[in-house]
Amino acid sequence: MIFSQRVGNAQAAIEALIVRACAGAVSVRWALDMTSGTAALLIALLHSGGQQVCYVPGKLVNRMSGAFAGEGKTDAKDAKTIAETARLRTDLTAITPSDRLIVDLQVLTSRRDDLKADWVRGVNRLRALLAGFFPALEGALDYSTRSPLILLIGFQTPSGLRIAGPDAIRDFLLEHRAFAKTTPTIVGKAIAAAEQTIAVATEAVSAPLVARLAGDLLDLDRQINDLDKQISERFGEHRHAKRITSVIGFGPVLGARTIASVLPTQTRRRETPHPSSHRPRPPPRRRHLGTATR
């Protein structure tokens, strides 16, 4: 081992490390167990400096860790294991600069996954709150769609629905751009649920929270729709876009996710194997009743 040090994930610190590692060295090969996320800046700086970068999978690191001295799992031990693995093996995958379009799709689809997770959590929280004081309305409508959420912005309690009446509820929904086709059904179910005449103790506190959550979910829905448009436009620029979407069930979002998760592996190439790997290998040994034969 020549040296071992902790390096901050900042440009100046990484550039200083590159200079130190290359000083007086005939050839330097960098080995990483990550190819994205927090390793993005390091990889970009290494590529900009013309450095060789190879990828050591985490599973390989775990298997190789037992071959080197030391117990426990630490960053320093993992770094040494990765370095020793890269020194001993010549068949590791080289990391080459990523395609800009693929990187963009990775970022966009990852953000969409985050928004969809927030959406699911928000719907579950809203249903739990609403079931606590107005269970009939909670079970009557599907709150993963826009129109029932619009209803909850204006009306959250049985008394509020009864006082407003069907006509006012319908006008409110249409004014706030609910789907006209489903509006009569929503109004009918809301009026039927409003037969509850007892106000639960938590109604006064929970009703405003339900209205606020419904508004947040509608905002999330707009963000997801805007992101879907951006993903569709960016995905359409890929050379395989038409071919992917020609498959039944594949739309722009699923196609973008496919490219982001599958095609980046093509940006890695196999390093040239050592000439010794082309030598003919002896036939496998066969064992019969404990006796080894060739």
Image (cartoon, rainbow, N blue to C red):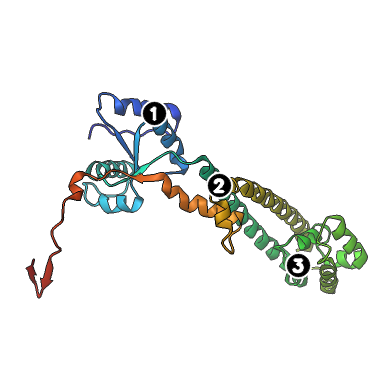
**Residue 289: quarter of image:** bottom left
| Residue under the image location 74 percent in, 57 percent down | 214
* Residue type marked 1: Gly
- Crowding near the residue tagged with mark 2, few <14, some 14–19, many ≥20 C-alpha atoms within 10 Å: few
Q: Is residue 33 visible?
A: no
Earlier along the polypeptide chain: callout 1 or callout 2? 1
Amino acid residing under circle 3? Phe
- Residue 137 spot, x, y in % from top left: 77, 69
- Tell me the distance, in whole angstroms, between the alpha carbons under discs 3 and 1: 63 Å
Q: Nearer the viewer, mark 1 or mark 2?
A: 2
Q: Earlier in the sequence, mark 2 or mark 3?
A: 3
- The tag on residue 133 is 3
Identify the secondary structure beneath mark 2. loop
Q: Nearer the viewer, residue 69 or 252?
A: 252
Residue 238 is labelled as: 2
Residue 99 at x, y = what percent? 49, 41
Residue 162: x and y in percent read 89, 68
Q: Position of residue 23 (x, y in %)?
A: 28, 24
Work out whether 114 lies above or below 247: above
- Quadrant that contains the N terminus: top left
Which residue corresponds to the image point at 40% horizontal and 30% vertical from the top-left? 14
Are the two marked residues, 3 and 1, in contact with CB atoms closer than 8 angstroms? no
Q: Which residue is mark 1?
A: 49
